[in-house]
């Protein structure tokens, strides 16, 4: 689908370049040629030819060609009925500034800032927003579509082969708009089914000790962890350790990155809703980080 969009763009670019070259050449010729005298009747005929040719025929041909290229491409991204295997439904909600991803037909699996899909299968992405207008776009897979609060829009995608792709919010949505990145990964069908089954069956244990008490008091109200907490205001953490990045693409999700995020998230991504942790001892934050590193199915 992204290839189809690219083909339309290159066709438009090539045709517009041709028109520019031809019109420029005619304009230069008209400027440099020696004027000749013509009768009023002939001048009117010449003017009519240019009006009809340049003002009616050329735009009509251009629009028809654009429609011939564009309509099939646009139609391919519409969630139209298909025969055989039905498209996978995925629900994506935009937040300032992170992505909530749900698989409602597959056990209600929820993740954040990553979209795992099966290669070769049609994907219907149902998008909306929890706050301001965002825009969902994975350039290497297809076109973009706005995410509007209170409305659900649908875009059809398909990854023709396994791979990792970058998604990006493409509608300015606040100070951290540029840091609203979506990790998209297409897996072989069998690998995707294994990932989905592992996520459905994964049941993490709650943290213990001081780390557990702090998580319960400070984190559980906003963050959800399957079987541990049910907060719904911040990213779901159930599979946090399996994600490549933290903060929707701000920092790598590794041993050092996780601890730095817990301590310096306000400086790494200013404006995010997570409160400061300055009053929490470093060893307690390390304990929470140790537990978060176990959250991988």
Image (cartoon, helix red, strand yellow):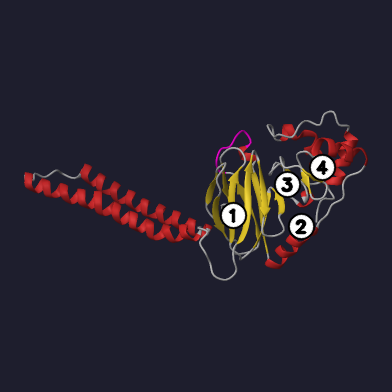
* Residue designated by label 3: 245
**CA gap, disc 4 and disc 1:** 34 Å
**Residue neighbourhood size for the residue with mark 2, other residues' Cα within 10 Å, grouped as few (<14), some (14–19), many (≥20):** many
* Residue designated by label 2: 199
Left or right of 50, for residue 135: right
N-term-proximal mark, 3 vs 2? 2
* Residue designated by label 1: 125
N-term-proximal mark, 4 vs 1? 1
Q: Position of residue 200 (x, y in %)?
A: 76, 58
Mark nearest the camera among 4 and 1 is: 1
* Residue designated by label 4: 256
**Residue neighbourhood size for the residue with mark 1, other residues' Cα within 10 Å, grouped as few (<14), some (14–19), many (≥20):** many
Does 174 appear in magenta? yes
Is the Cβ of the residue at disc 3 closer than 8 Å to that at disc 1? no
Element type at mark 3: strand
Q: Position of residue 215 (x, y in %)?
A: 84, 39
Is the Cβ of the residue at disc 4 closer than 8 Å to that at disc 3? no
Left or right of 185, for residue 204: right
**CA gap, disc 3 and disc 2:** 18 Å
**CA gap, disc 1 and disc 2:** 19 Å
Q: Where is residue 276 in the image (x, y as percent from the top left)?
A: 78, 30
Element type at mark 4: helix
The overriding secondary structure of the stretch rendered in magenta is: loop
**Quadrant assignment, res 277:** top right
Left or right of 62, for residue 115: right
The residue under the point 88% across, 41% down is 212
Q: What stretch is highlighted in magenta?
A: 170-176
The residue nearer to you, when weighing 77 against 138, is 77
Mark nearest the camera among 2 and 4 is: 2
Indicate which disc residue 96 carries: none
The residue under the point 29% across, 46% down is 24
**Residue neighbourhood size for the residue with mark 3, other residues' Cα within 10 Å, grouped as few (<14), some (14–19), many (≥20):** many
């Amino acid at each position: 689908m992204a290839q189809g969009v690219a083909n339309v763009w290159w066709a438009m670019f090539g045709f517009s370049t041709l028109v520019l070259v031809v019109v420029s050449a005619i304009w230069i010729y008209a400027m440099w040629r020696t004027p000749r005298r013509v009768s009023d009747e002939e001048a009117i005929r010449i003017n009519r030819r240019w009006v009809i040719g340049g003002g009616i025929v050329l735009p009509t041909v251009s629009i028809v060609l654009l429609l011939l290229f564009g309509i099939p491409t646009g139609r391919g991204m519409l969630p139209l009925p298909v025969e055989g295997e039905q498209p996978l439904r995925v629900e994506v909600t935009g937040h300032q500034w992170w992505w909530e991803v749900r698989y409602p037909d597959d056990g209600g699996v929820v993740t954040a800032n990553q979209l795992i899909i099966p290669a070769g299968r049609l994907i219907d992405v149902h998008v909306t927003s929890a706050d301001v207008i965002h825009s969902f776009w994975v350039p290497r897979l297809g076109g973009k579509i706005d995410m509007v609060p209170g409305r659900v829009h649908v875009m059809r995608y398909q990854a023709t082969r396994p791979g990792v792709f970058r998604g990006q919010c493409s509608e300015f949505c606040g100070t951290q708009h540029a840091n609203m990145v979506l990790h998209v990964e297409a897996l072989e069908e069998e690998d995707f089914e294994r990932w989905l089954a592992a996520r459905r069956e994964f049941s993490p244990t709650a943290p213990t000790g001081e780390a557990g008490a702090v998580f319960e008091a400070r984190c559980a109200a906003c963050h959800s962890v399957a079987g541990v907490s049910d907060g719904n205001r911040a990213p779901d953490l159930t599979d946090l350790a399996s994600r490549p990045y933290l903060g929707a693409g701000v920092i790598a999700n590794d041993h050092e990155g996780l601890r730095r995020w817990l301590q310096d998230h306000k400086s790494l991504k200013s404006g995010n809703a997570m409160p400061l942790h300055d009053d929490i001892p470093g060893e307690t934050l390390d304990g929470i980080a140790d537990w978060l590193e176990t959250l991988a199915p």
